[in-house]
Image (cartoon, rainbow, N blue to C red):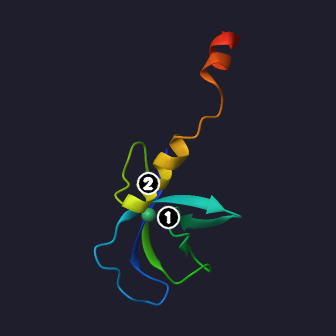
């Protein structure tokens, strides 16, 4: 389960044209979009947003998707090591 967020108005109060769904992450207790680090929430910024929890996918921001693919490409352990542990 992960959370996705869509900004309908930015922090300056401007309407966001064709808003995209971003992956929402929490850093130091503040929710933000993965790609731009745009913070949101009550008392955090005046962005207007929609947020939802999804089981699979739900992200259509290419910048977020690119970041996720970068993270997924990180090898945390060698395959040999995993096999040896069995
Ligand atoms: Zn994004």
Count of labels in the image: 2
Q: Is residue 60 rendered to the left or right of residue 31?
A: left
Crowding near the residue tagged with mark 2, few <14, some 14–19, many ≥20 C-alpha atoms within 10 Å:
few
Closer to the camera, 5 or 77?
Answer: 77
Closer to the camera, 81 or 52?
Answer: 81
Tell me the quadrant of the picture where the C terminus can be found. Answer: top right
Q: Where is residue 21 in the image (x, y as percent from the top left)?
A: 38, 62
**Element type where label 2 sits in the image:** helix
Q: Is residue 83 rendered to the left or right of residue 40?
A: right
**Element type where label 1 sits in the image:** loop
Q: Position of residue 25 (x, y in %)?
A: 57, 58
Q: Mark 2 points at which residue?
A: 66
Q: At 63% across and 17% down in the image, what residue appears?
A: 80
Q: Where is residue 47 in the image (x, y as percent from the top left)?
A: 48, 80
Q: Is residue 62 rendered to the left or right of residue 11?
A: left
Q: Mark 1 points at which residue?
A: 35
Residue 52 in which image quadrant: bottom left
Q: How far apart are marks 1 and 2 (CA)?
A: 9 Å
**Figure quadrant, ligand 1:** bottom left
Above or below 31: residue 58: above
Tag 1 near tag 2, CB within 8 Å = yes
Crowding near the residue tagged with mark 1, few <14, some 14–19, many ≥20 C-alpha atoms within 10 Å:
some
Mark 1 sits near ligand 1, with its Cβ under 8 Å away: yes
Closer to the camera, 16 or 71?
Answer: 71
């Amino acid at each position: 389960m992960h959370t996705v967020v869509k900004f309908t108005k930015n922090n300056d109060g401007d309407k966001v044209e064709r808003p995209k769904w971003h992956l929402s992450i929490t850093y130091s207790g503040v929710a933000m979009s993965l790609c731009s680090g745009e913070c949101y929430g009550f008392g955090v910024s005046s962005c207007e947003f929609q947020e939802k929890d999804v089981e699979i996918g739900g992200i259509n921001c290419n910048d977020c998707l690119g970041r996720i693919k970068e993270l997924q490409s990180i090898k945390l352990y060698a395959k040999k090591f995993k096999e040896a542990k069995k």
